Image (spheres, helix red, strand yellow):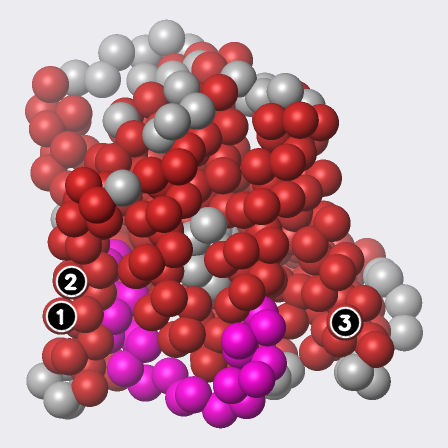
Amino acid sequence: MLAIFFQTIPFFLIIGLGFGAGKTGFFSDEATGWLTKFVFYFALSAMLFRFAANLSLADIFDLRFVMAYLWATAFVYIIATMVAFLRGLNIEVASVEAQCAVIGNVGFLGIPMLVMLMGEAAIAPVMMVLAVDLLVFGSLIVILITGSRDGRVSIRILRTVGLGLLKNPMIVSIALGLAWSGLRLPIPGPMNDFLTILGAAATPGALFAIGASLASKSAERMSVAVWLTACKLILHPAFVAFSALFLFHVEPYSAAVMIAAAALPVAGNVYILARHYGVAPQRVSASILLSTGAAVATVSLVIGWVNTLY
């Protein structure tokens, strides 16, 4: 377990470096925004495309895997939503809190860290977790918030969701990579080198950007943040483990990667959505800050445990 902790420390040290650069003002909010855009649209997309182009849809898609992750995530989502309703919150705030409870930083933190710690074979299950998060729960929060404001779910809302997915570079790069693989097209040497070099920038760039963005986060509503952090770092991986291992009997290695992905801290894109719609951005900010700090210990524990499953 201690060995796993030492392996995860470099990832969080880079996050800490970014946090320090942002906190001291050496790295401005504007610089963080541009770095995040570079990683999101170029480096991470190159990494995902190269991985997907060397896989087939059959390598990635596993219905039992999807059902196990979807069932467990939906269960925790419902728990967080019910707790929010019991506290008298409306559906908009409840949906944002539920999103904090289940959506982890799979794109910027999970892909580089889990592939490095658990092997390149982890990319297929990580991609599937990412796809479910984006396609199902990323769409759900938009539908709930806009539907609540409009009083109904309209074609306009569904069009907004569809366009959002089509513009998401992670979805696009995975789809293009799988299409490339499906057509059995070889990746020319210069193209492969280009994707490898550009994709290599994703890991340090994403981690540094996470840290720099945390520097501008506030720590308000800490009692709520503690609850949402517990949901994300404890309840979510626990229910995913139960679902994958006992309900759907997912293959051990894939189950281990799924559980590790579920243990990741709250994703930054939840804050982006909360700020975009003007719904509880402060509590999301605090949840990201607290869960990322706590994940230094909890992620190591979870990865150490899941490594015994296969």
Quarter of the figure that contains the N terminus: top left
The image shows residue 104 at horizontal and vertical percentages of 48, 55
Q: Amino acid at mark 1?
A: Leu
Q: Which residues are magenta?
A: 205-228
Q: Tell me the crowding category of disc 1: few under 14, some 14 to 19, or many 20 or more residues within 10 angstroms, Cα based.
A: some
Specify whether residue 211 is painted magenta. Answer: yes
The image shows residue 178 at horizontal and vertical percentages of 43, 23
For disc 3, the marked residue is 83
For disc 1, the marked residue is 17
In this rendering, the label closer to the viewer, 1 or 3: 3
The one nearer the camera, 255 or 59, is: 255
Element at badge 2?
A: helix
Q: Is residue 39 left or right of residue 69?
A: left
Work out whether 299 lies above or below 285: above
Contact, mark 2 vs mark 1 (Cβ under 8 Å): yes
Picture quadrant where residue 120 is located: top left
- In the image, which disc is placed on residue 13? 2
Q: Is residue 292 left or right of residue 70?
A: left
Cα distance in 3D space between marks 2 and 1? 6 Å
In this rendering, the label closer to the viewer, 2 or 1: 2
Residue 181, visible in the rendered structure: yes
